[in-house]
Image (cartoon, rainbow, N blue to C red):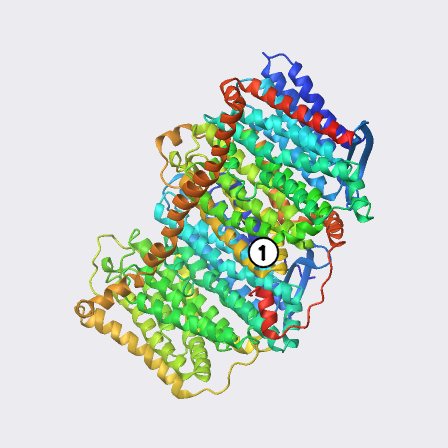
Amino acid sequence: MHQLWLIPAFPLLGFLINGIFGKKFSKRAVSLFAVGSVLLSFLWVVKTLMAISPLETLYTEHYFTWIASGAALNIGFDLSVDRLTSVMLLVVTGIGSLIHIYATGYMAHEPGPNHGGYYRFFSYLNLFMFFMLILVLAANYLLLFVGWEGVGLCSYLLIGFYFVKKSATNAGIKAFVVNRIGDFGFSLAIFLIFIQFGSLDFQKVFAQAGGLADEVQAGVITATCLLLMVGAAGKSAQVPLYVWLPDAMEGPTPVSALIHAATMVTAGVYMVARSAPLFNHAPIAMEVVAVIGLLTAVMAATIGMTQNDIKKVYAYSTVSQLGYMFLACGVGAYSAGIYHVMTHAFFKALLFLGAGSVIHALQGEQDLRNMGGLRSKIPVTFLTLLCASLAIAGFPYTSGFMSKDEILVAAHHHSPAMFWIGVITASMTAFYVWRALFLCFFGRYRGSAHPHESPLVITLPLGVLALLSILGGFFRVPVWLEPVLGKAPEGHDPALVIISVAAGLIGIFLAWLFYVAKPGLPDTFARALKGLYTLVYNKYFVDEAYDAVIIRPVVDGSRTVLWKGFDVGVVDGIVNGVGSVSRGVGGILRTLQGGSIRNYAALTLLGAVLVLAAVAFTGGAQ
Amino acid sequence: MTLLDALIAIPAAGFLITLLLPRDNPGLVRNFTLFVSLVVFLLSLGLIGPVQENPGVMHFETNVPWIDYPAIRYHVGVDGMSLWLIILSTLLTPICILVSWNYIQKRVKEFYAFLLLLLAGVTGVFVALDLFLFYVFWEVSLVPMYFLIGVWGHDRRIYAAVKFFLFTMAGSVLMLGAIIVLYLKGGSFDLPFLLDSMAKGGLVLNPGQQFWMFLAFFVAFAVKVPLFPLHTWLPDAHGEAPTAGSIMLASVLLKLGAYGLVRVCLPLFPRVARENADWIIGLAIIGIIYGALVAMVQPNMKRLVAYSSVSHLGFVVLGIFSFTQIGLDGAVYQMLNHGISTGALFMLVGYLYERRHSLEIADFGGVSSVAPWLSVMFVVTTLASIGLPLLNNFVGEYLVLQGAAQVNFTYAVFAAIGVILSACYMLWLVQRTFYGETPHEVAHHMKDFNAREWATMLPLLALMVWMGVYSQSFIPAITASNSRTLDMTRQSAVASQPQAPGPLARLKEIFHVR
């Protein structure tokens, strides 16, 4: 036993201590428990991974039976690790630690009682770490689902952290409910897996998946994989369930970085990669995954180009990058997808934390139109954001370049069209990220705050992440994952690399042209393409469509048709009708309802006893 | 007298003694009834050990004649299924007494006396093995609840109480009729005797008789569950009942119906039950979705929780009529889960009412800012109620849905929609009540938990976590008892041998496309 359970147990303990007693603690004590527990978890991850290596197959620890019914169903509280898990564990606890440290600085000056809910923030954050680690360590689908729903809960709590604000709690509910729609698909997949394989343990399910070759099983596995993808689309914000993620930016910025960029939203990618043995037998489902990923990548990128809120730009960027990861999984390059999960965690967490530093410096300003010229005022933030922007634009040998290249090559292997759409998206990505960078740091300052550089607890994590964003690609994840997820398609074509690098550089150049060299251009374009611009700026009116087509009809219908119509109108109408008829005929109820309850009850009891006695005696007489 | 007899006799005696206590000393009444209910609770824990040793059979059985002619026997016993339902009842009674501590100010004596009588009645239903005795306890449990609503309820209490009485009475008259016909045919009210005699061919009912008698029992139980569309008494009863009344109603009384289905309907009429499972499951699934949708648009908190009960109990009926071990285990476990989490919800709503004197959601807002612990407990209970993993309801819902999916995947597809909707109505309730700006009236009256309120909350909280994380403390006993029930229903079932299906047919079979 390597005591894997300790990995999630540390943050759970941190959650309990801060959650129950945190109100009475000083900020320093809260930070100590919150950051300490995650650091311990990180150290334990490192220790166990080194002890268990080489991790080529699942190493599982069984603790107790969680749910059992008869001989057929037995679901254990089992944790396991292999190489796939190891990458996720290191990202979650490593980035998690950095963001916890950052947050002790970022959340230090919240207004309101109890230091603005400082202890509450960190207890939620620790609870998130617990569930995320359960998700990653789970050895069966149902336990994975525990983490899956649990991180959703923490996301809900943290998006709605400023619970006095209506827009924040609305966004929290939206996130939870949309995720539930995804979880609907995931849970149906779980039922199918159990019916088909008689178990939910990864090892047992995957062992059987290889042996089932005939058409029947293929059909069931395809259905299962499609349902799993519904779940993944909810958690990882893919079309058509991506709508909650941009709204989730209502949460404090460290939350956006940790949950809505680096870790939780990649859970869907992890789940698909984990289920690779199933997906490999379901080519149709894989095609669907690839197409959804690509579609999401393009759509979100176009929206990202028009947004003015710095966090919204990065949010759509996250949706888009997640699309890349699904594209990778869909074309069979799972390891490239996980590679991108890791590098994206580096540069996207950095983008958000950097944005947080900007917002912090500007006393809460998030609108890019009110920024500008901050390069000299907050130089450390600028330099780190520059690193992240280089990485996401795919500048050669940065981390983003390495993983994106891997994905695009695999996509080309599968279908050149997918490669080209991916390249165009890469160009758009470079454009909107650099647009944000230019609007924020170049030109003239357009706001009225007095910007100041953030303290060391904030800039230190930025520095570490900047280093990882540039150099992190040299952790060759696909090679490490080969024993678990198989070999990625061979054949590095230098032409493809050149094309994708060029696409990124073109994006950067256009952003420079539009926002530094010729600042009048964007408006000219927006005016020229007014219809298209309005459509994209308003995010294709998808939220409005959902509201008009689904939410309103359901709520109004429930109120007027079901409740007032059927319940009160039809059923009660019949009952009251019968009641009044019997009243008219018997006349007994009328007198009783006029009298006191005591009489009524006594008479009813008496009546009941008489009926009983009468029936009993006639029964006996026969 | 066995321990089981004492569990009925002590609260019954407590009821009588309480009525004799002086009217001008409500403190004495409260302390006395609390003491009695705690004693009963502690004694009921004594059932666990012996029953768990062999939960498939009856324990603590007493079988003595009560009335010679017609032969009505006092025949009681407890097995793995009734065990936890009894303990649920004995646990919730002292909690209800504590909940009412300040809330009930008029006719204090009668109120607490009725709570004890209610406990005696429901315990009697859970242990009775003679059908006539079952019926008597069934009626005994009805009367105190009628008074709890009618005397101590809100403004429209009389209407709600009468409606409750009429619905339940209409059902139980049908049940009584069926019990008498069974007696005429089988010569006994004794359930095990009747089952034995059916199995050996001594008691033969033609299909028509079986159908009508099944229906009579079924309607009586379905009203109580309540199954759509017989549920409309429930929102009124809950909306008007005092807090303790709502807790007992939701947590225990509704379970009498579901318990009756498993204990009486399935074993007595297995063939009819299986033949009619399709439309019953249809109603259950309609109830799951319908209850959730109507809950979503309720302006009144208690009615919202009441409609959520319609939705949750739909899962229970779905599990029962799936006729699978997994589904049935889930259904029985879900009865307990619903008792804990919905009981807690009604309790918390009651605490909100005591402070703000309103049940309209629109009168609240921002409670989190002024009563943080109350809010935390409400949110945790909400999460339990909407089936968050590691809390109790998840285990039950998963088992029910997994069982249903095994019979017909479409069932699971539709029922799982209820899981999505539960998040909508509960989180929306939480948002409107606890988040946002705090209106002056709320800020002024909303105090956080006091010690007594903590004492009522913590046991329920502990159970939500325990039952969600370590269900193995509870489920094995249920499984053993259910597997025996399922065996009984299988005796008449004929196993058909389907031909080996082609791939498309197999897919269709799994998704039940016709």
Question: B43 or A431: nearer the eye?
Answer: B43
User: Against B453, is B195 above or below?
Assistant: below
For the C terminus of chain B, the image quarter is bottom right
Can see residue A8?
yes
Which chain does the numbered disc 1 sit on?
A
Q: In this view, does A542 lie to the left or right of B397?
A: left
Q: Which element type, helix, strand or loop, lies under badge 1?
A: helix
User: Against A49, is B105 above or below?
Assistant: above
Counting from the top left corner in percent of width and height, residue A444 is at: 20, 62
Residue A242: quadrant of the picture: bottom left
Counting from the top left corner in percent of width and height, residue B488 is at: 76, 50
Are there few (<14), some (14-19), or many (20+) residues within 10 Å of tag 1? many
Can see residue B453?
no
Residue type, label 1: Pro
Residue A373: quadrant of the picture: bottom left
User: Against B297, is A439 above or below?
Assistant: below
Q: How many marks?
A: 1
Question: B51 or A352: nearer the eye?
Answer: B51
Q: Name the residue under label 1.
A: A8
Q: In this view, does B457 lie to the left or right of B189?
A: left
User: Against A254, is A58 above or below?
Assistant: below
Q: In this view, does A229 lie to the left or right of A307?
A: right
For the point 76% across and 32% down, the residue is B4
Question: A344 or A190: nearer the eye?
Answer: A190
For the N terminus of chain B, the image quarter is top right
Counting from the top left corner in percent of width and height, residue A490 is at: 50, 86
Counting from the top left corner in percent of width and height, residue A621 is at: 78, 29
